[in-house]
Amino acid sequence: SRQSHIRNFSIIAHIDHGKSTLADRILEATQALTKREMKEQTLDAMDLERERGITIKLNAVELTYKAPDGETYIFHLIDTPGHVDFSYEVSRSLAACEGALLVVDAAQGVEAQTLANVFLALENNLEIIPVINKIDLPNADPDRVKKEIEDVIGLDASDAVLASAKTGIGTEDILKQIIDRIPAPTGDPDAPLRALIFDSLYDAYRGVVVYVRIIDGTVRVGDTIKLMATGKTFEVIEVGVSTPKIETRDALSVGDVGFLTASIKSVHDTRVGDTITYAERPAAEPLPGYRKMNPMVYCGLYPIDTARYDDLREALGRLELNDAALQYEPETSEALGFGFRCGFLGLLHMDIVQERLEREFNIDLIATAPSVIYKVKLTDGSTVDVGNPSEMPERKYLEEVSEPYVKATIMTPNDYVGTIMELCQRKRGDFKNMEYLDDNRTNIIYDLPLSEIMYDFFDSLKSSTKGYASLDYEMDGYRVSDLVKMDILLNGEKVDALSVIVHKEFAYDRGKAIVEKLKELIPRQQFEVPIQAAIGLKIISRSTIKALRKNVLAKCYGGDVSRKRKLLEKQKEGKKRMKAVGSVDVPQEAFMAVFRMS
Ligand code: GDP
Ligand code: MG
C-alpha cells in the first residue's frame, strides 16, 4: 500500500554540520530537481536564510524515491534550523516525523545542540540514524566521532553512515537506512481526520496556508473541516505538497505532509499545534499539540514613520502566523510614540523578526534595546513583571527585584576549561558542575543571568576557544539581584526608550561607557547636546556632543561637485535610521549601544 511506503523524517544537527547540504543531496538523489534547478541549500527558501547561510524556518518537501530494490517510496523530508533560538521550530517538525537523521561533523564531533536535538528526537520517540558528515575534510576523524556518539549521546553508532554531503559519498546508504529503519506511519485512513498544524503563513492571494501532517483520516478538496482549538469551520479549497515545486492534489491521507487552504481570512483562526478534523464527523480527541513557548527577550519596535503604525500591527499579525514564538502588544513611548513591545526567544530571533518586518512588509523600524523580564516585588506586597526598563518602579517602592537565570551547558575540549570558567565568572556566573564526557571533552555547567549571556557571551565563548566550545541553555527560574534602573538624559530630558537595568556593582562603569558611546553615535546637531546617565536623581556620568559647525558643505566650497553630492547622500543615508527624540536625532545604533554597554 501507499502508506507502507511512506517515510517521514527530519534532519537534526548542530549548526553548520551540514543539514541543508545533505538535504540538497537527498533532493538530487530523488530527482526532485534537475541539476540546473538546484541551488545550494535549496530548502533555505527565504532570501534572508541564503544571505546569512542559516536555516530559520522548518521546510517540508515530498520526494519520490525509486529504491534499488525496485520499490518506490514516498519521503517527507523536513529540514530544521540549528540555532538554539529556533529549537521551537525543531520540536514542531519532529512531532510530524517517525525518524531523524542525526548529522554530526566528522571534524567537530558532538556539540551542545547535537545533544539538545537528540533529546528532542527521543522525546518524540523517533528512530535516530547517525550520519557522520564531512568525511572529505583532511582533519575528519570518523572513528573518534563514532565513539563520541556512543559515549556522549549513548546511541549505537556501529551502523553510522560515513558521508560527505559535499561530494555525495554515503547518500545511497542514507536512503537505504531511511527505508529499512524508519517505520511507516501507523494511522487509520478511515478514522475521523486528525491533522496536526505544524506551520502556517499568510499568502496575499490564497489567505492563510496551513501546513499539516495527517495522523488519521483523509482530507479532500471540498471537505468541511473544523479547527479543534477555535471550533471554526471552513471548506477546503486546495490541498497539496511541495516537491519543492507546489503541486496540488485531490487529497492528503495518513502520513502525508503538505498544505491546505480553506479561505481562512483571519490570522487568528488558526494556531500552530492545533488539530484539524471533520466538521461532521469530528475526532474524539485533538492531538497533543505543542508546548507554548515563552519569550525570553523583549524589545520595543517603533515605525520610523509614525503614520505606519497600523501597517506594523498588520505585519506583526501576519508574521505571528508564520512565527508561532513571536508575541507582541501595543505600547507607547514618550520618546518614540506608538509601537509594540515584542517578545522573542533570543537575540537572533529578535534580529530576524525585525529584518523580516522590514523586508517582507517594507516598514522601517527602530528597535529599542532588548531586555529580559524582571519580577519585581513592591513594598505594598504586590508583584509586577517588568519587560520594559523605563517601567521599572522608583526605588522607594521596590522591595526586591529578581532576574531570570539560565542553566548553561558548555561543551568544550579540555584545554579551554579554565578560559571558559573565567568568562562565566566575569558574567556573574555560578559554577554548578563539571562532567568529563570522554578523554578530551568536558561539559561545564553554570547558572548565569540571562541578561549577561544575551549579548556577547556566545561570541566571547567562540573566540576564546577557537570556535571549539558550544553552548546550550535552558531557563532556570528567577533569582533576587541587586539591580538598578539607569536613565539616560539627552539635552536635559529623560529618554524613556534609552533606560536600562544594570547590576549595581557595574552601574558607574557602564554609565560612563554608555555616555561615551552615545557621544560617538549621535550626530552633531545645530546646538550643543549634553548626555547624562542617572540613577534616580543622581547623575553618575556626563558628556557633551558639540554643536555642528555652521555649514558642513563649506569645506567643499569650490571643490568638485561629486564630492559634495556624496557628502549629501551620506547625510541622507544616515538620516534613514534615525528617530527625532524631542529636538535630537537619535540613530538606531544608539538604542542598541545602551544594551551592548550594559
Ligand atoms: P547547516 O547549518 O547544518 O544547515 O549546514 P550547511 O548545510 O549550511 O553547511 C554548513 C557549511 O558546511 C557549508 O559551508 C557547507 O558547504 C559545508 N559542508 C556541508 N557538508 C559538507 C561536507 O560534507 N564536506 C565539506 N567539506 N563541507 C561541507
Ligand atoms: Mg541549514
Image: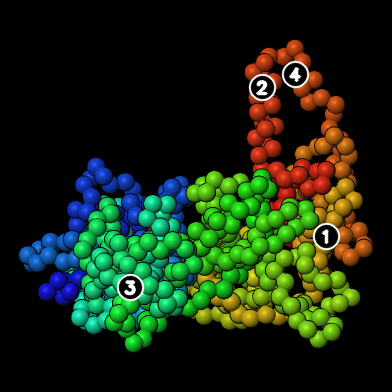
> Where is mark 3, residue-wise?
225
Marks 3 and 2, the one that precedes in the sequence = 3
Q: Earlier in the sequence, mark 4 or mark 3?
A: 3
Name the residue tied to disc 2: 565
Which is nearer the N-term, disc 1 or disc 4? 1
Q: How far, Cα to Cα, is label 2 from label 1? A: 39 Å
Which-is-in-front pick, marks 2 and 4? 2
Which label's residue is closer to the chain start, 2 or 4?
A: 4
For the N terminus, the quadrant is: bottom left
Mark 4 residue type? Cys
Disc 2 marks a residue whose amino acid type is Arg
Look at the numbered disc 2 and give the secondary structure of its residue: helix
Bin the neighbour count of mark 1 within 10 Å (Cα to Cα): few under 14, some 14-19, many 20 and up: many
- The residue singled out by tag 1 in the image is 487
- Judge the density around disc 3: few (<14), some (14-19), many (≥20) Cα neighbours within 10 Å: many
Q: CA distance from mark 3 to mark 2?
A: 61 Å
Q: Judge whether residue 8 can be spotted in this image.
A: no
Q: Which mark is residue 556?
A: 4
Q: Which residue is painted at 23% across and 45% down in the image?
A: 35
Label 1 to label 3: alpha-carbon separation: 53 Å
Image point (83%, 43%), residue name: 583
What kind of element bears circle 4? helix
Within-10-Å neighbours for mark 4: few <14, some 14–19, many 20+:
few
* Label number found at residue 96: none
Element at label 1: strand
Q: Position of residue 465 (x, y in %)?
A: 55, 61
